[in-house]
Image (cartoon, rainbow, N blue to C red):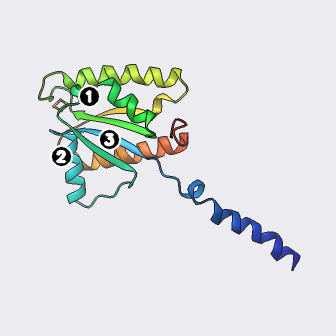
Amino acid sequence: MSERNEEMPKEENAFKRPSALFWEPEIIVFCCSYCAYSAAALAGSQRLQYSSGIRIISTPCTGKLESEHILEAFEKGADGIIVAGCLEGSCHFLEGNLRARKRTDRIRSILEEIGLGSERLKMVNLSDSMAEAFVQHMQDAIATIGALGPNPLKP
Ligand code: FES
């Protein structure tokens, strides 16, 4: 009888902490409308599975994404951010994705300096047909950011 009573609190605790047991990162993906957004749509039409914590925002070109947009998303509680642009050499605005790469590298340094972790931000390059690669990037990000834990700035 006493053994059974000792086991009960463990089970109760398990049910009282669902967020700790089932926490899933919220990741904002800024997708270039010419490539990565189409790759995401193709993944959906092929019924490829990825986390429900992924939030996709279409942007005309990753070069149009300002540092403020990324930093504001972190301030508002995003656990991670992915900037998904066209393959290098394929940007419709010539060098937008190269500028975006430099910008994300700079912000990654800032994130590391302030203790948030540079791994919370990454840039990937995709063509519109790379649905499986899109999903793989999402799964990799969920694993990486899941290991870091929630954004400590989360309101
Ligand atoms: Fe796709 Fe510039 S048009 S990254």
- Direction from residue 20 to residue 106 in the image, left or right: left
| Label 1 or label 2, whichever comes before in sequence order | 2
Distance from disc 1 to disc 2, alpha carbons, whole Å, reads 18 Å
Q: Which residue is mark 3?
A: 29
The nearer-to-camera label among 2 and 3 is 3
The amino acid at mark 1 is Leu
Instruction: Identify the secondary structure beneath mark 1.
Output: loop
The amino acid at mark 2 is Ser
Which residue is at the front of the view, 125 or 146?
Answer: 146
Residue furthest to the right: 2
| Label 2 or label 3, whichever comes before in sequence order | 3
Distance from disc 1 to disc 3, alpha carbons, whole Å, reads 12 Å
Q: Is residue 67 above or below residue 119?
A: above
The amino acid at mark 3 is Val
Q: Residue at x 55, y 42 (%)?
A: 149
Q: Which residue is mark 2?
A: 38
- Direction from residue 122 to residue 6 in the image, left or right: right
What percent of the width, then of the height, locates residue 5?
A: 82, 74
Q: Label 2 CB, ligand 1: below 8 Å?
A: no
Q: Report the image quarter containing ligand 1.
A: top left
- Which mark is on residue 65? 1
Q: Residue at x 53, y 23 (%)?
A: 114
Which residue is at the front of the view, 90 or 146?
Answer: 146
- Which mark is on residue 50? none
What percent of the width, then of the height, locates residue 57?
A: 27, 42
- Direction from residue 33 to residue 104 in the image, left or right: right
